[in-house]
Amino acid sequence: MKIGITTVSNVIEEWTYKDLQDLKEALTEAGAEAKMIYADSLDMELSKSGITPFQSGERAAGASKGRERIDVDGVLLRHLGTIRDYEQFTYRIFCIKAFEELGLPVMNPVLPWLFATDKFGALMRLSAKGIPVPETVVTEHMFVGYSALKRLGPSVVKPLRSAMGFGIFKVDDPDLGMHAFSYLTNMNKPIYVQKFLEKKGSGDYRVVVVGGKVEGAEFRKGITWKSNVAQGAIPKKAKLDEELKELAVKSCEILGLDYAGIDIASTKEGYFVLETNPTLSWQGFRKATGINPAKSIANLILSRAHR
């Protein structure tokens, strides 16, 4: 049994590398082989015989002329790499979709993964199903963003696609926010304004769900208003009540995710789902809880690959 793990040719982030190593070790322990699939080196051949996936370049180990056919029994979708163009983005998305068209289990499935990695897409679906989310305005018009800041008060402005708290900033003054919105508009970027929440304990929960079950949770106490471990937040093992567990599991179900880290804030008004992370890094979670979710992820995809 061979399971592909999507990554990119040049992994520089330490936590990303450790996540990949955890998955490789978990698959090996379960009696399977891990095969790296480099998203920035994928080729697809289409014919009346069907779809044949290849990867090219120096990473194509043992292949003649640096090209090899990809022969796997399932795929763990982790990373698609840096995207510089819309067509490049859709190409890589449909390359992963091609593995699904071949009848292989892909975790997380690429279209649910796409929704969950987009902050607007994820909260749109959750809100439509009654999941509590912060008040949020998404627009391409800077004056709409300005009006939202005046109405919502202190708010957080986020890129639609980002991770680990990078590129996220807090705005208290609508006129200062207007300068940022002018820049985003000129760069053809949507504007995402979310009401700032006063979180209990100056942090939030990261609940890890695999196969519809809660693996565990960490409470990430920020050294600033950000609660990302990559931004210096301190993770500690957390005890969860049933409402928190149900919110996390239901969020995964609504988005169609096999596994994810669900970020949830506790406020005086109740719980709010902040973000969903289908490519979560679990190094902080593992350190805080002693739980390695890679084992459950590996077992889940192997159970589906055996069908």
Image (spheres, rainbow, N blue to C red):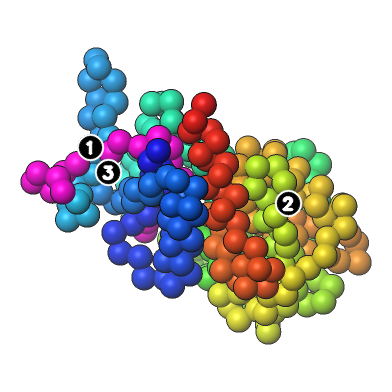
Residue 219: x and y in percent read 74, 70
Q: Is residue 246 visible?
A: yes
Q: Which is more toward the observer, 90 or 297? A: 297
What is the C-alpha distance between the residues marked 3 and 2?
34 Å
Residue 287: x and y in percent read 62, 73
Q: Which is more toward the observer, 132 or 31? A: 31
Q: Is residue 96 visible?
A: no
Which residue lies at the image location 23% right of the left edge and 30% below the top edge?
45
Q: Return the residue at label 2.
A: 214
Say few, some or many: other residues with alpha carbon within 10 Å of mark 2 (under 14 / 14 to 19 / 20 or more): some
Q: Return the residue at label 3.
A: 42
Q: Which is more toward the observer, 141 or 193? A: 193
Q: Quadrant of residue 170?
A: bottom right
Three-letter residue code for mark 1 = Arg
Three-letter residue code for mark 3 = Leu
Q: Is residue 80 magenta-colored?
A: yes
Q: Is residue 141 magenta-colored?
A: no
Q: Judging from the image, what secondary structure is the residue with disc 1 in? A: strand
Say few, some or many: other residues with alpha carbon within 10 Å of mark 1 (under 14 / 14 to 19 / 20 or more): some
Q: Quadrant of residue 196?
A: bottom right
Q: Which residues are magenta?
A: 62-82
Which residue lies at the image location 73% right of the left edge and 62% below the top edge?
217
Which residue lies at the image location 84% right of the left edge and 73% below the top edge?
200
What is the C-alpha distance between the residues marked 1 and 2?
37 Å
Which mark is first along the chain, 3 or 1? 3
